[in-house]
Amino acid sequence: MSYENKSKVNGNSKNEQLEEFRVDDSGKHLTTNQGVKVSEDEFSLKAGERGPTLMEDFHFREKMTHFDHERIPERIVHARGFAAHGEFEVYESMKEYTKAGFLQDPSRKTPVFVRFSTVAGNRGSAETVRDARGFATKFYTEEGNYDLVGNNIPVFFIQDAIKFPDLVHAVKPEPHNEMPQAATAHDTFWDFIANNQESAHMVMWAMSDRAIPRSFRMMEGFGVHTFRFVNEEGKAHFVKFHWKPVLGTHSLVWDEAQKINGKDPDFHRRDLYESIENGDYPEYELGVQLIKEEDEFNFDFDVLDPTKLWPEEEVPVKIIGKMTLNRNVDNVFAETEQAAFHPGSVVPGIDFSNDPLLQGRLFSYTDTQLIRLGGPNFHELPINRPVCPFHNNQRDGYSRHTINKGQVSYHKNSLAQNTPAPASEEEGGYTHYQEKMEGRKVRRRSESFKDHFSQATLFWNSMSEAEKEHIIDAFSFELGKVMSKSVQQQVVDMFAHVSLEMAKGFAEAIGAKVPEGPGSTVTKSSPALSQENTVKRPHTRKVGVIVSSGFSGSEVTKALKELKEEGLQPEIISSKLGVVKSGEGEELEVDHTFLTCDSVLFDSIYVAGGKELDKKFKQDTSYFVKEAFVHFKPIGATHEGVTLLKDIGIGQCSGVVTGERMDTFTSDFIEAIAAHRHWDREIV
Ligand code: HDD
């Protein structure tokens, strides 16, 4: 059965525009690109049945040439990505702070296109690697496209864009053997870190659970830099942008993440794609942190330093709107791959700060599209076109689609009454914030950018015990893969400035010299940074339900019904596909066998059992359940499942819910699932 995108088109101006470009080839005659109907597509034109192919076979030549040119260069970073369409609405007018049109009117829905990505891996790499995730949003506003090109980590490795090529060279697979793929666990990355210590704060995030999100739907997004909101009166505020997922921020565990990479390298895109197809639309609230221009110097961080966050307890996040992703793309290449984001795409009411990382990004993104998308007309590609009209004197170049009429393509002119004409501010013309500037030309880092460790310690201090353990394990893993003893030791010594306890923890694990000092004197913490304090909801969680023939029909089907009613997604696992029959004759369609899925692909496991439990079934169940157990996942068991669990050696403990009392089983189990993981479980 061929796939049909059933998402609605009407009411979303971007989708209505894209509809003009969408083509459905099914049911049509095959033609060449010149529109000539093709009579044969199996055999090339030959001089005799056994003779050579002829040059005049224009259909063969066109088909083959197009195929030979199908690939374009992948993004130098963020090559592996997945995207969806949606819409954004503001909760209340933000007039007081910004004149941005899409932030004025709660009844206005602004179309958006969001691309999530990993940073380091190539286009075909696995998705649950340890890495930052890109979170790039294109708002198709009525005043032009606004791109919020962020990550799921609120700070960055470096403070100045001139170091970006060095950072990326160090992160990418090493040049002499092109290993490892999509991983920072290698010498050049850690050599870079130890010798560029401004990276300390972001490394803490990268070693934390944040770098292995459970889903794109369950991670935060951050604009990272300080931008400016400017209102009608020309008054500005510094602003930082946040996306807060309605389902909360949740992560995988490292062992699980690595196994998923083998079992389902498309894990994150599948999750996003299926959620949208199921109508479980991913939602994120937009939050802003605002600092008055006059308060610029009233904090213990420099607002221009992209390695610093603004603790939410000091500068609260004001929730101002919501984004809903409600349509999958029709064609990944045409939309996701050809999408061109640019932090410099702003609209009136949003402006830049002098963050030197942002300033450099303003150059890099157009530059990269020129090579990747093959010329200066990438803004004409359907996915990149604004929904508002655009007019200027730019002309020609590769793949120009627009047919500009008339003689005039210059300003000023008299032949076209000096049009297209610049718009005044009142007419909506973009005017740059008139920041007063003076200074000498220098190649220097500001003194106020020199504290590299305080916020790294703030992050460490804010973690729960389980999160701290994961960070130490992550360092131990990554540095354990580093060959150079010197680099290992440099990293240990560097992070001894962040936390002695932490550095000692991984120094021991990798056999490095355990540091004596210096440690940190920072005692501050920010509870908002811990995922322990995030929203916890069971909605859309996947439950692998292990069932065999002769299961307790009415009670198990009732439990499954209740799980579904609460928005969870039970999927039936048994030894073979087809149906399993209960003792009373009820039938359940089997979704997976033990071969076609794995416990790492579920949020929780429910062992419902059945009368027919052969040795193989028990072994497979045991493997599934033990794996879920060591990944701290909620486990439920009823009927024969209770005995199976006991036989495996899993007794009463945190997050293990057994149906001794069927009347409370599902509610207890759902509560355990909502908690996400049970870190207080003792693994022996
Ligand atoms: Fe970047 C892509 C996010 C620093 C240069 N970046 C890219 C994407 C995201 C980010 C999400 C993928 C967009 C998409 O899905 O197509 N980048 C960030 C963030 C940064 C950051 C949050 C720090 C705050 N980036 C950064 C710097 C430079 C670049 C300092 C260079 C000076 N980034 C690029 C790029 C990419 C890119 C090479 C590759 C593909 C693209 O732009 O379109 O130009």
Image (cartoon, rainbow, N blue to C red):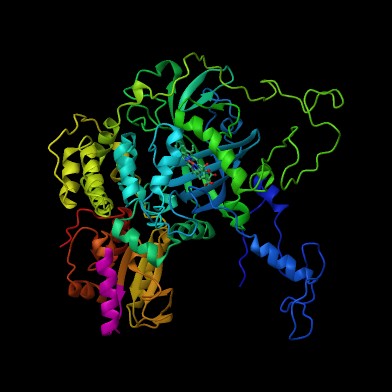
**x and y, in percent, of residue 521 in the image:** 18, 29
The C terminus: image quadrant: bottom left
**Count of labels shown?**
0
468 and 197: which one is in front? Answer: 197
Figure quadrant of residue 32:
bottom right
Please give the name of the residue rendered at 41% of the width and 50% of the height, measured from the top-left corner.
172
Q: Give residue 634's quadrant in the image.
A: bottom left
**Quadrant in which the N terminus appears:** bottom right
Q: Residue placed at 82% from the left, 67% from the top? A: 36
In the rendered image, the residue lying farthest to the left is 516
At x 37%, y 33%, the residue is: 307
Q: Is residue 234 above or below residue 384?
A: above
Q: Is residue 483 left or right of residue 385?
A: left
**In the visual, does 56 lie left or right of 285?**
right
Relative to 270, say whether 295 is above or below.
Answer: above
In front of the other: 589 or 511: 511
Q: Is residue 30 visible?
A: no
Q: Is residue 528 above or below residue 582?
A: above
Measured as percent of width and height from the top left, residue 420 is found at 77, 28
Q: Does the rendering let one see residue 540?
A: yes
Q: Which residues are magenta?
A: 608-628
| Up-down relation of residue 103 to residue 487 (above or below) | above
| Majority SS type along the magenta span | helix
Image x and y of residue 600, in percent: 34, 64
- In the rendering, at what x and y percent does residue 205 appear? 33, 42
Q: Nearer the viewer, residue 677 or 118?
A: 118
Residue 152 falls within the magenta-colored stretch: no
| Residue pictured at 37% horizontal, 69% vertical | 558
**Residue 618 located left or right of residue 287:** left
